[in-house]
């Protein structure tokens, strides 16, 4: 990487850390310049505007989410192994983020009534992830692992609910054992929808 690209990557790293803690709206060029020991104009040289910076931070967050949660899960066989991997990796990521915060969750609160490109990007990213979860559920139904009358939207909704409750209890209320509760909840969900006649063969 050229020096300019390295600096830009370093700025984005710190910006992501700040945005995780203070929200995307709490991210300012001034705060970032202070943290980087740079001038404001030095930071502006890499990002034309605060919104550009926020957008780049969001893209970096999305990229890391895909690398840690989505891509490794897709390597698992279709059906329950893939769905279970998606949830397990998602939970693991949220549990690591308890100290800082999940931009998808904090962003949903910040931008629920704030129209504009950042809200649109956030919504598109969350919808893409929900779409991936829906596909994994549908494949689990198609291969017979889940009951044929399983409603994929309902199951994904309930999975999302567990993640939001985990984030709330662990980050806001600081309740111990929230992680176990999320995992128990998911196991019970899958048990509820599991097809008892499904033989152990896995279709790919």
Image: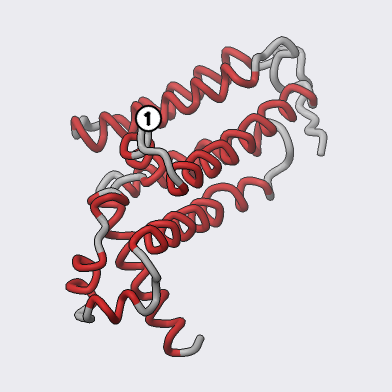
The one nearer the camera, 38 or 103, is 38
Locate residue 44, reporting x and y percent. 33, 74
The answer to which quarter of the image holds residue 6 is bottom left
Q: Where the C terminus falls, by quadrant?
A: top right
Whether residue 10 sits left or right of residue 64 in the image: it is left
Question: Residue at 26% across / 29% down in the picture?
Answer: 169
Question: Residue at 49% across / 20% down in the picture?
Answer: 158
Question: Residue at 36% across / 42% down in the picture?
Answer: 107
The residue under label 1 is 164
Relative to 45, residue 55 above or below = above
Question: Residue at 76% across / 13% down in the picture?
Answer: 197
Relative to 97, residue 169 above or below = above
Locate residue 76, reporting x and y percent. 68, 45
Give the secondary structure at mark 1.
Answer: helix
Relative to 99, residue 185 above or below = above
Q: Residue furthest top?
A: 149
Relative to 192, residue 115 above or below = below
The one nearer the camera, 164 or 196, is 164
The one nearer the camera, 16 or 196, is 16
């Amino acid at each position: 990487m050229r020096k300019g690209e390295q600096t830009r990557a370093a700025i984005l790293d710190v910006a992501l850390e700040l945005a995780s803690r203070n929200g995307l709206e709490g991210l300012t060029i001034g705060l970032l310049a202070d943290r980087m020991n740079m001038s404001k104009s030095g930071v502006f040289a890499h990002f034309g505007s605060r919104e550009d910076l926020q957008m780049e931070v969001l893209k970096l967050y999305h990229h890391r989410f895909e690398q840690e949660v989505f891509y490794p899960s897709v390597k698992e066989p279709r059906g329950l192994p893939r769905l279970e991997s998606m949830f397990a990796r998602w939970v693991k990521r949220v549990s690591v983020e308890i100290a800082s915060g999940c931009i998808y969750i904090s962003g949903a609160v910040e931008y629920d009534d704030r129209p504009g490109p950042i809200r649109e990007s956030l919504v598109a990213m969350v919808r893409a992830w929900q779409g991936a979860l829906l596909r994994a559920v549908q494949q689990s139904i198609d291969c017979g692992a889940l009951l044929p009358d399983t409603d994929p939207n309902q199951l994904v909704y309930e999975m999302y609910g567990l993640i939001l409750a985990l984030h709330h209890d662990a980050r806001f209320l600081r309740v111990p054992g929230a992680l176990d509760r999320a995992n128990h909840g998911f196991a019970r969900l899958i048990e509820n929808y599991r097809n008892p006649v499904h033989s152990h063969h896995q279709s790919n």
